[in-house]
Image: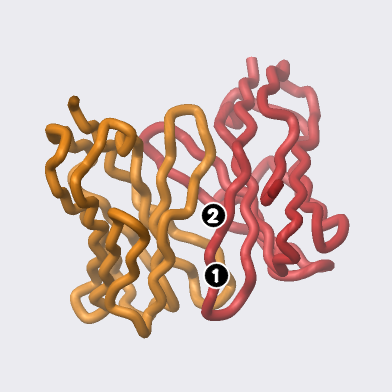
Amino acid sequence: NAGVTQTPKFQVLKTGQSMTLQCAQDMNHNSMYWYRQDPGMGLRLIYYSASEGTTDKGEVPNGYNVSRLNKREFSLRLESAAPSQTSVYFCASSFRGLNTEAFFGQGTRLTVV
Amino acid sequence: KQEVTQIPAALSVPEGENLVLNCSFTDSAIYNLQWFRQDPGKGLTSLLLIQSSQREQTSGRLNASLDKSSGRSTLYIAASQPGDSATYLCAAPVGSQGNLIFGKGTKLSVKP
């Protein structure tokens, strides 16, 4: 019963390096999301994809890009990592409409030095 | 713009006590409200989703209520146990898209 799977679980980057966070869901959900969680700031939406082929910016999109590869997979890319992007990143998925119960992955703890 | 607030930020109770966690929101035109649990270093686990047409939703020792007119939801935990210690988050979706606006959570500690 996998649900939402994120890789990697931990990552340390040097400033300026790039990386891609991977996310896959097996619940046939239409929508997928990337959030970041920071102490004192709570969870904030970075990007979301309401359906395959579409992506939209959330509250804090600067410095990130996303790709909805297919219905199952949604990746988040940091092109040139900055210390301000040190955070815990969560991927989530849900249906659209009235029943938007969201399910989350276990998170990626990213440190940029 | 929807804002979600959770007060208090932290709560400590003795084992066995019944307790209520509070969540307030500014835009009453919500489709639903979701409660999550987060253990340290872990992801979010969905506890309950309460639809706008419902007033209550129950799962085991947990009961969530929703009052759209007052902009409030509560999570009632009966007979608390040390294993209930975690951070509890509430979140409201933006329209029908499913993007969630989160409160900052209530950190619950249940003492044996």
Chain letter for mark 1, please.
A
Q: Please tell me whether mark 1 or mark 2 is closer to you in this view.
A: 1
Determine which residue is flagged by label 2. A59
Q: Residues within 10 Å of mark 1 (few under 14, many from 20)?
A: many
Please tell me in which quadrant of the rendered image residue A110 appears: top right
Q: Residue at x 29, y 69 (%)?
A: B26
Q: Where is residue A87, by image quadrant?
A: top right
Crowd around label 2: few <14 · some 14–19 · many ≥20 (10 Å) = few
Q: Residue at horizontal 34%, vertical 80%? A: B54
* B16 and A83: which is toward the camera: B16
Left or right: A29 in relation to B20: right
Chain letter for the red part: A
The disc placed on residue A71 is none
Q: Which amino acid, mark 2?
A: Glu
Sequence-first disc among 1 and 2:
2
Element under disc 2: loop
Which chain did the image draw in orange? B
Can residue B12 be seen at all in this image of the molecule? yes
Whole-number angstrom distance, CA of label 1 to CA of label 2: 19 Å
Q: State the residue in front, B107 or B109.
A: B109
What residue type is disc 1 on? Thr
**Residue tagged 1:** A100
Tag 1 near tag 2, CB within 8 Å? no
| Horizontal relation, residue B25 to residue B20: left or right | right
Q: Is residue B52 above or below residue B18?
A: below
Residue B92 at x, y = what percent? 42, 65
Residue drawn at 47 percent across, 68 percent down: B93
Picture layout, residue B110 above or below residue B19: above
Residue B4 location (% of width, % of height): 33, 59
